[in-house]
Amino acid sequence: MNPYAGIGEYRRFMGAAEAQKAINSFRGLMEGIAIDGRVDAKEQAELTNWYNLYRGQIDRHPFNELLPAIDLALSDGVLTTDEVSDLLWLCDQVSSGSYYDLITSSVQALHGVIHGLLANNELSTEEVIQLRGWLSDHSILRGTYPFDEIYSLVESVLEDGQVSETERNALKAFFSEFVDIRDSCNLDENELSKLREQYSIQGICTKNPSITIPGHSFCFTGASTRASRVEIAHEISVRGGVFTPSVGKKTEYLIVGSEGNPCWAYSCYGRKVEKAVALRKSGNNIAIVNELDFWETLDNTDSMEVV
């Protein structure tokens, strides 16, 4: 029995807000599919699959405008980049924007972009490079989950300008956490589940974080290259910050020690990082930062005070 049978029927009863979320995600899906300037047969099939999932909405806005346009674009079996541009334009026209703020709508689009990138179950260097450009253009999402994590991982992977097979699998493992496999005809949950087991990527540091110490709450995990935990707590408190031994809802920064592993993009750092990631998922504005960025902030602050 198909575990996803009936999902299209369920979507016939979606509310207005859920419909808007679907359009935001579809816009991202289109951007992700065409991010490298090409649309292959599998990516086209993924778009057709989305159309079939939502065609029960054909009599209601905004699907009554969008679905016929998708049907027309797919009718000749070839989806061109011009047709993609037209569909993206139409998404902007039918989006009311009244149910979600810009941040929420953009996060929904980001999930769609990730889905589009994985649509053909492949991930090229060009696609990852273009994703970095998309993320840079949407820097308004800094501080939100999963923007910081994705941006940091992409920057780390592209440091040498190439995407190795190991890095490609790690990206697929992480990206798959943000795709509803029920919406896909190409992605295999068993394959992705095995990748997630092999590549543990939770707790990725914020890239180039903005750290403010006075009046803010800090926690530390791991081993430091420079000081003991007591000394770190002292450095924070004398600058007007608050140091706590555990991660909580009031924690604003979790500093991760980098001793023995300065490049930690694919590592899992235990319960504190997992707790911080869980809090970020639930909407708490907590930044996970590498201690090297923390010390750089202190050094820059001290040098400015001396001057």
Image (cartoon, rainbow, N blue to C red):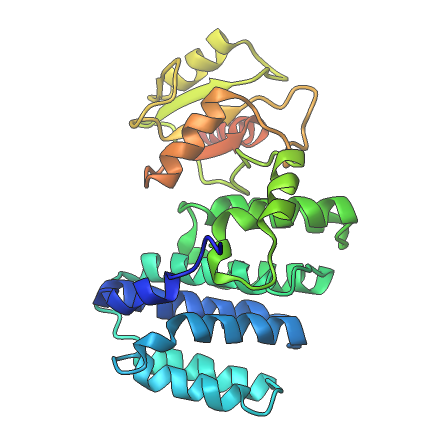
Q: Position of residue 302 (x, y in %)?
A: 49, 26
At x 49%, y 40%, the residue is: 209
Question: Left or right: where does residue 199 sit relative to residue 75?
Answer: right
244 up-or-down from 26: above or below: above
Q: Position of residue 124 (x, y in %)?
A: 72, 61
Q: Position of residue 87 (x, y in %)?
A: 46, 83
Question: Left or right: where does residue 206 sit relative to residue 143?
Answer: right
Question: Of 209 and 200, which appears nearest the observer?
Answer: 200
Q: Position of residue 259 (x, y in %)?
A: 66, 19
**Is residue 286 in view?**
no
Tally of numbered tags: 0
Question: Of 76 and 256, which appears nearest the observer?
Answer: 76
Farthest residue in the front direction?
Answer: 1
At x 50%, y 68%, the residue is: 29
At x 59%, y 64%, the residue is: 119
Question: Of 182 and 32, which appears nearest the observer?
Answer: 182
Question: Left or right: where does residue 227 sit relative to residue 10?
Answer: right
At x 71%, y 50%, the residue is: 168
Residue 205, picture quadrant: top right
**Is residue 287 in view?**
yes
196 up-or-down from 53: above or below: above
Residue 262, picture quadrant: top right
